[in-house]
Amino acid sequence: MKRLLLGAGILLLSSAALADDCGNANNQIEMNTCAANQLKAADSKLNAAYGTAMKRAPEATKTLLRTAQQKWIALRDADCALISSGTEGGSIQPMIHAQCLTDKTVERTAWLESLLNCEEGDLSCPLPPPH
């Protein structure tokens, strides 16, 4: 439960911080570019959390984590294709798509980070505590 609350808090703070970065965009091209940059930053954070989780995971868990991550990416991409399909062909579509990917990536990062900070004795956590 604490992990869920921590993840939700991180997600809310991250989304607010990301939204502030695009406040000065003046046209759709700038907004699309800004959304793409936010996605790139969120993806970097996700990759760092995933890398740390993979380093800490026992060998038997690494395959499960890799499979889960690959399937999550496929789900995220499919969800965001659906979300942005209503703007197909419009100049706003890249921004809507990137924002969806960013939101889901920030959420996944928070979840992975929660696995890296499990409390001692949390049997629902597949990763051992840091050494």
Image (cartoon, rainbow, N blue to C red):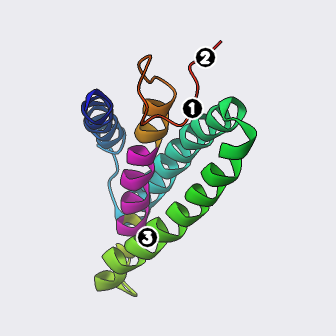
How crowded pointer 2 is (Cα within 10 Å; few <14, some 14-19, many 20+) is rated as few
Q: Is residue 14 left or right of residue 130?
A: left
Query: Relative to 32, does residue 113 appear above or below in the rendering?
Result: above
Q: Residues within 10 Å of mark 3 (few under 14, many from 20)?
A: many
Determine if the magenta segment contains residue 55. Answer: no
The residue that mark 1 highlights is 127
Residue 53 occupies quadrant:
top right
Mark 3 vs mark 1, foreground winner is 1
Please state which amino acid type lies under the numbered disc 2.
Pro
Contact between marks 3 and 1 (CB within 8 A): the answer is no
Amino acid type indicated by mark 3: Pro
Magenta stretch mostly in which secondary structure? helix
Q: Would you say residue 99 sits in the magenta stretch?
A: yes
Question: What residue is at 34 percent from the left and 72 percent from the top?
Answer: 92
Residue identified by numbered label 2: 130
**Percent of width and height locating residue 41:** 53, 42
Who comes first in sequence, dot 2 or dot 3? Answer: 3
Numbered badge on residue 94: 3
Q: CA distance from mark 2 to mark 3?
A: 39 Å
| Figure quadrant of the N terminus | top left
Q: In this rendering, is residue 62 above or below 124?
A: below
Q: Is residue 7 above or below residue 39?
A: above
Span shown in magenta: 96-108
- Quarter location, residue 87: bottom left
The percent coordinates of residue 110 (x first, y second) are 41, 37
Spot occupied by residue 26 in the image (x, y as percentages of width and height): 32, 54
Q: CA distance from mark 3 to mark 1?
A: 36 Å
